């Protein structure tokens, strides 16, 4: 039987963790969602958009090869660890990690048996039997109450927690309310809709998120844009320049100081692009006007589709 990857099941963002005996909780790893497929001696890695990523992460592929199964399809996350052993998304993006590891949190197929309609608790039990003792790390459920788990995860400065219904079935490609993700840091994906030109390429980015079919303005990003990153982003967006502003809510009535709105005068100094490139941005908070405060570029996200970029719920 030939095993093929499926689009991963996605979690719904929320501001607070759900409670109750029907829920279990695990770390939200700060990495790249990846399906790991083993067919005999052959291993392949697939991104959330089902792009073959095997060649990019050969050490992870070798780790999956150590799993004692004739065929298996694992769901998990590729995570970069720095010299202190802490997850580092920047290190993963720039491939400057001290170590790359694969945390598996689900098994969707095992030795000829499809498990999509098997409850999560049973899938986890099967996962443990094949990954424990291998170079694949098991993302075990966390002990304690939601409040205790949140305190512990915040204390370790990890990204967040994913709550999952113990009886949930696997829903390929669907953003399900059976899985709930809560982020503890202020960071999310945004879509580039414009930029301010600079001496060589660009000075800052104009970013936003989708609400329905409308692209809404979130803020301008300048911090974190190194010369190398500016050049790389400009290379990607320059061919997609357009004359019309893609944001449904610009110009705004707020002043054009850094981190605030974009006036009609500001817009004459900006260039617009088709909203195709997704970036990861950290920030201190959302202002009362719904704009980013003290934003900073983190990474380009090739694994996220622009249409899937929405504003995360406020905590």
Image (cartoon, rainbow, N blue to C red):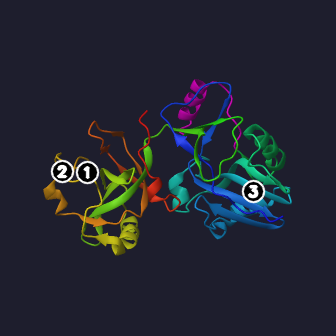
Q: Along the line of sight, which residue is nearer the eye, 65 or 177? A: 177
Q: Is residue 95 visible?
A: yes
Q: Give me the disc on residue 73.
A: 3
Q: Give me the disc on residue 256.
A: 2
Rounded to the nearest angstrom, the CA distance separating label 2 from label 3 is 50 Å
Residue at 60% over, 29% down: 149
Tell me the quarter of the picture where residue 194 sits.
bottom left
Magenta residue span = 139-159
Q: Position of residue 19 (x, y in %)?
A: 60, 25
Q: Position of residue 99 (x, y in %)?
A: 64, 56
Q: Nearer the viewer, mark 2 or mark 3?
A: 3
Rounded to the nearest angstrom, the CA distance separating label 1 from label 3 is 43 Å
Residue at 82% over, 60% down: 71
Magenta stretch encompasses residue 290: no
Q: Along the line of sight, which residue is nearer the eye, 308 or 85? A: 308
Magenta stretch encompasses residue 146: yes
């Amino acid at each position: 039987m030939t095993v093929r990857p499926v689009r991963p099941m996605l979690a719904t963002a929320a501001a607070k963790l759900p409670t109750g005996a029907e829920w279990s909780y695990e770390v939200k790893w700060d990495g790249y969602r990846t399906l790991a497929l083993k067919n005999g001696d052959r291993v392949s890695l697939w991104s959330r958009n089902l792009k073959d990523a095997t060649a990019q992460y050969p050490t992870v592929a070798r780790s999956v090869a150590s799993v004692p199964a004739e065929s298996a399809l694992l769901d998990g996350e590729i995570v970069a660890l720095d010299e202190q052993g802490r997850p580092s998304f920047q290190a993963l993006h720039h491939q400057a990690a001290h170590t790359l590891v694969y945390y598996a949190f689900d098994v969707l197929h095992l030795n000829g048996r499809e498990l999509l309609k098997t409850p999560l608790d049973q899938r986890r039990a099967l996962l443990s039997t094949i990954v424990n003792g291998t170079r694949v790390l098991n993302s075990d459920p966390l002990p304690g109450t939601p409040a205790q788990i949140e305190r512990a995860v915040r204390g370790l400065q990890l990204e967040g927690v994913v709550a999952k219904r113990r009886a949930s079935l696997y829903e390929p490609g669907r953003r399900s309310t059976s899985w709930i993700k809560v982020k503890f840091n202020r960071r999310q994906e945004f879509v580039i809709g414009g930029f301010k030109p600079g001496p060589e390429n660009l000075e800052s980015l104009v970013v936003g998120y989708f609400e329905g079919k409308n692209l809404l303005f979130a803020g301008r990003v300048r911090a974190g844009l190194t010369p190398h990153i500016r050049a790389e982003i400009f290379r990607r967006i320059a061919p997609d320049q357009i004359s019309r502003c893609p944001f449904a809510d610009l110009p705004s009535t707020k002043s054009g100081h850094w981190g605030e709105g974009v006036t009609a005068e500001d817009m004459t100094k900006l260039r617009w692009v088709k909203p195709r490139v997704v970036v990861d941005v950290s920030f201190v908070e959302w202002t009362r006007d719904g704009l980013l405060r003290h934003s900073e570029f983190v990474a380009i996200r090739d694994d996220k589709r622009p249409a899937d970029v929405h504003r995360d719920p406020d905590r």
